[in-house]
Amino acid sequence: MYSFVCLKFNFFYARKDAVATIHKKEGISALWSGTVPSIILATNPAVQFMVYEALKRRIQGQGKQKNLASLTYFAMGAVSKMAATIVTYPLQVVQARSRVSIKTNVLAMLLNNK
């Protein structure tokens, strides 16, 4: 059974064919475009967890209660996810742009905001 992937209107019938064609036409760096921002984006869950735990400690510390209402946990989760997304969203943009443009310098993109 063949599976094929479309990349810039090229059809590949096997993974080996895709890697060879991309390497030949776009260079070896095309296979790794967007990797650095992807690794940095692994911080999103860490930021979310940190904010969630800080909110939980602050809210539990104020009321001296161990169990909170379900709505409070939901709100803390929503706020922490929002904070993590705000912090890491620029990296998602860099990641998407670097995957589209292979020759883009990721560091320059981060510094110049282009």
Image (cartoon, grey):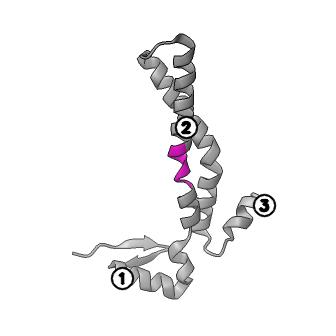
Query: Which label sits in the foreground, 1 or 2?
Result: 2
Q: Which residues are magenta?
A: 41-46
Residue 94 picture quarter: bottom right
Q: Hey, what amino acid is under mark 1?
A: Lys
Residue tagged 3? 112
Residue 83 picture quarter: top right
For the N terminus, give its image quadrant. bottom left
Q: Position of residue 84 (x, y in %)?
A: 58, 41
Residue 40 picture quarter: bottom right
For the C terminus, give its image quadrant. bottom right
Q: Position of residue 12 (x, y in %)?
A: 37, 78
Q: Does residue 45 belong to the magenta stretch?
A: yes
Considering depth in this image, is 13 or 114 the residue closer to the camera? 114
Helix, strand or loop status at disc 1: helix
Q: Please rate how many residues cluster around mark 2, counting C-alpha atoms within 10 Å: few if below 14, some from 14 to 19, many from 20.
A: some
Residue tagged 2? 50
Q: Does residue 39 belong to the magenta stretch?
A: no
Q: Hey, what amino acid is under mark 3?
A: Asn
Q: Decide whether the magenta segment is chiefly helix, strand or loop.
A: helix
Helix, strand or loop status at disc 2: helix
Question: Which of the marked residues, 1 or 3, is nearer the chain's N terminus?
Answer: 1
Question: Which of the marked residues, 2 or 3, is nearer the chain's N terminus?
Answer: 2
Q: Hey, what amino acid is under mark 2?
A: Met
- Against 12, is 56 above or below? above
Considering depth in this image, is 61 or 20 the residue closer to the camera? 61
The residue shown at (51%, 24%) is 75
Residue tagged 1? 16
Cα separation, mark 1 vs mark 2, equals 41 Å
Helix, strand or loop status at disc 3: helix
